[in-house]
Image (tube, helix red, strand yellow):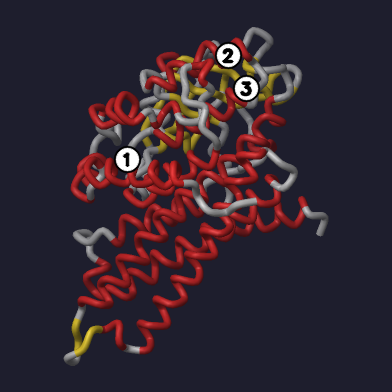
């Protein structure tokens, strides 16, 4: 077992980082978070055509590149570092649902469009009750696949042309492919505008069954574990960046004739941040390996990584603001953008307390 990234994976990291520095600067992030769609179509097209990022984990037979979850984690880490505004993570969720559905016809119908960037796809399973497990599914589907109910907190739901919807059908929870034009999607006013969310009213839209009827939550259990690992990797990227931001400011900011980084209190804050960020990397990277192998440790590692990386990112983002002092509290400074992303990511797919309880259950405590 080798926990070091390969030379090719490091090259991928540098390739993506260079692209993000060029296309997802602070100025670009602020510009896109104020738009209705929340992303730049030109950049999205470049991601697909020049970088092939949307096709990364999609098998070659469906128009993708067939890379592993480790490569996806490398890319997400760099996107988290840059606060990329794009419907990428939502597309990953939809792709994972299709890939693990066991439905080859659905894969052939939808994955090539996602891989090319032409299809904006998302996964709609959460509802206004805010639950992350099967008990939160209240939307229903009749025997013909007509869907009723409302989905909420749907990533990029207002721009998606394809929604993978979890609903209670006649035989239990099932997954359905729904055309985005057949639903009413309204963007939500959220704390973190770098990642758009929407309320989706199904309005009797016709859904096409994906996978076996009544087996939708079995698929979703795997998808949510993989999603937790993917998000942990993204959180690590953001946490590393705010650590670097804090350390650089501690070196540059002078008070009482000396850099504030020379004061013990600031040193301790930076040291604690470093310890947490490095530990978060270990948790996230091990999770990526488990996800790539799809081994028996995935379920427990996913919850462990999500809980720890959520805490580490949020703490690092908060300490970064404290180290910056008054300027860190202002709208003009990027520190608050990372703080908001850290908070929204902390809650996505369940907060740390939820995942610690889930971890305890999964290891038999």
Within-10-Å neighbours for mark 1: few <14, some 14–19, many 20+: many
Mark number, residue 85: 1
Left or right, 358 with respect to 59, comes to: right
| Residue 135 screen position, x and y as percent | 69, 38
Label 3, on which residue?
A: 175
Labels 2 & 3 near each other (Cβ < 8 A): no
In this rendering, which labeled residue sits more in front, label 1 or label 3?
1
At mark 2, the secondary structure is helix
Earlier-in-chain disc, 2 versus 1: 1
| Residue 105 screen position, x and y as percent | 60, 10
Mark number, residue 291: none
Left or right, 119 with respect to 230, comes to: left
Within-10-Å neighbours for mark 3: few <14, some 14–19, many 20+: many
- Residue 231, above or below 210: below
- Residue 212, above or below 42: above
Gap in angstroms between the C-alphas marked 1 and 3: 27 Å
The image quadrant where one finds the C terminus is bottom right
Which quadrant of the figure has residue 183?
Answer: top left
Mark number, residue 106: 2
Residue occupying the point 44% across, 35% down: 155
Q: Foreground: 332 or 364? A: 364
Residue occupying the point 50% across, 54% down: 346
């Amino acid at each position: 077992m080798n926990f070091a990234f390969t030379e090719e994976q490091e090259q991928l990291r540098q390739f993506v980082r260079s692209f993000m520095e060029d296309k997802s600067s602070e100025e670009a992030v602020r510009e896109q978070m104020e738009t209705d769609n929340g992303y730049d179509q030109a950049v999205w097209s470049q991601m697909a055509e020049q970088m092939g990022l949307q096709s990364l984990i999609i098998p070659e037979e469906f128009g993708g590149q067939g890379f592993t979850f480790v490569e996806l984690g490398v890319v997400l880490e760099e996107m988290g570092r840059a606060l990329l505004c794009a419907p990428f993570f939502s597309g990953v969720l939809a792709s994972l649902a299709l890939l693990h559905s066991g439905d080859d016809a659905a894969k052939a119908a939808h994955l090539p469009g996602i891989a090319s960037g032409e299809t904006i796809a998302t996964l709609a399973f959460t509802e206004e009750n805010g639950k992350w497990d099967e008990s939160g599914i209240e939307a229903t589907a009749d025997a013909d696949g007509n869907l009723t109910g409302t989905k909420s907190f749907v990533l990029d739901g207002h721009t998606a042309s394809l929604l993978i919807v979890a609903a209670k059908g006649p035989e239990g929870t099932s997954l359905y492919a729904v055309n985005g034009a057949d639903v009413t999607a309204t963007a939500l006013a959220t704390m973190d505008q770098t990642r758009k969310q929407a309320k989706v009213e199904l309005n009797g839209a016709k859904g096409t069954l994906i996978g076996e009827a009544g087996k939708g939550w079995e698929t979703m259990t795997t998808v949510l574990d993989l999603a937790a690992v993917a998000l942990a990797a993204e959180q690590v990227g953001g946490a590393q960046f705010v650590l670097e931001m804090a350390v650089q400011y501690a070196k540059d900011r002078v008070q009482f004739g000396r850099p504030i980084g020379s004061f013990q209190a600031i040193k301790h804050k930076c040291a604690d941040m470093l310890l947490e960020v490095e530990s978060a990397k270990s948790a996230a990277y091990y999770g990526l390996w488990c996800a790539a192998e799809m081994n028996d440790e995935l379920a427990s590692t996913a919850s462990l990584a999500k809980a720890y990386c959520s805490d580490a990112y949020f703490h690092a983002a908060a300490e970064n603001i404290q180290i910056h002092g008054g300027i860190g509290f202002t709208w003009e400074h990027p520190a608050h953008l990372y703080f908001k992303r850290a908070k929204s990511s902390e809650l996505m797919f369940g907060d740390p307390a939820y995942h610690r309880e889930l971890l305890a259950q999964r290891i038999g405590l």
